[in-house]
């Protein structure tokens, strides 16, 4: 179950941080879906709250990261994305 939750979280980050604009014309819809997913208060399997429960993470911290990312300039976004690449989940 942890691998599924991690996969969902990583895909949401990818859809926001590095959408494939050239290879897929639906990238803007995917990014919007990911943003809505991050801010949803639903707790069903697959939701942010469910993912955070499975991974023992704080959803407020993820939302704070996302808010900072969205407010940042290009160089800060790049720096934040590099740190995200090294993101580790406790096993």
Image: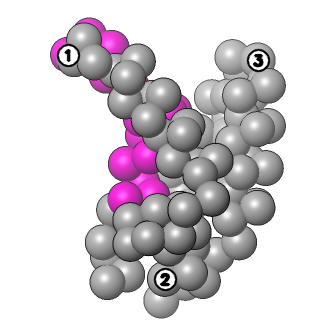
Q: Earlier in the sequence, mark 3 or mark 1?
A: 1
Look at the picture and state if 11 lies above or below 19: below
Q: Quadrant of the N terminus?
A: bottom left
Residue 24 located left or right of residue 72 = left
| Residue range corresponding to the magenta coloring | 8-23
Q: Which mark is residue 54?
A: 2
Q: Position of residue 40 (x, y in %)?
A: 59, 52
Considering depth in this image, is 10 or 82 the residue closer to the camera? 10
Distance between mark 3 and mark 1 Cα atoms: 25 Å
Residue 19: give x, y in percent of width and height. Answer: 39, 25
Say whether residue 14 is magenta: yes
**Secondary structure beneath label 3:** loop
Q: Is residue 12 magenta?
A: yes
Q: Nearer the viewer, mark 1 or mark 2?
A: 2
Residue 63 visible in this rendered orientation of the protein? yes
Q: Which residue is mark 1?
A: 23
- Dot 2 alpha-carbon crowd within 10 angstroms: few under 14, some 14 to 19, many 20 or more: some
Examine the rendered structure and indicate whether residue 35 appears above or below residue 61.
Answer: above
> Residue tagged by mark 3?
73
Q: Nearer the viewer, residue 90 or 82?
A: 90
């Amino acid at each position: 179950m942890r691998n599924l939750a991690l996969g969902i979280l990583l895909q949401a980050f990818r859809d926001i941080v590095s959408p494939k604009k050239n290879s897929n014309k639906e990238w803007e819809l995917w990014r919007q879906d990911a943003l809505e997913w991050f801010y949803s208060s639903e707790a069903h399997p697959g939701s942010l709250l469910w993912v955070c429960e499975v991974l023992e993470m704080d959803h407020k911290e993820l939302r704070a990261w996302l808010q900072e990312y969205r407010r940042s300039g290009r160089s800060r976004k790049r720096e934040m994305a590099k740190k995200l690449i090294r993101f580790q989940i406790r096993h």
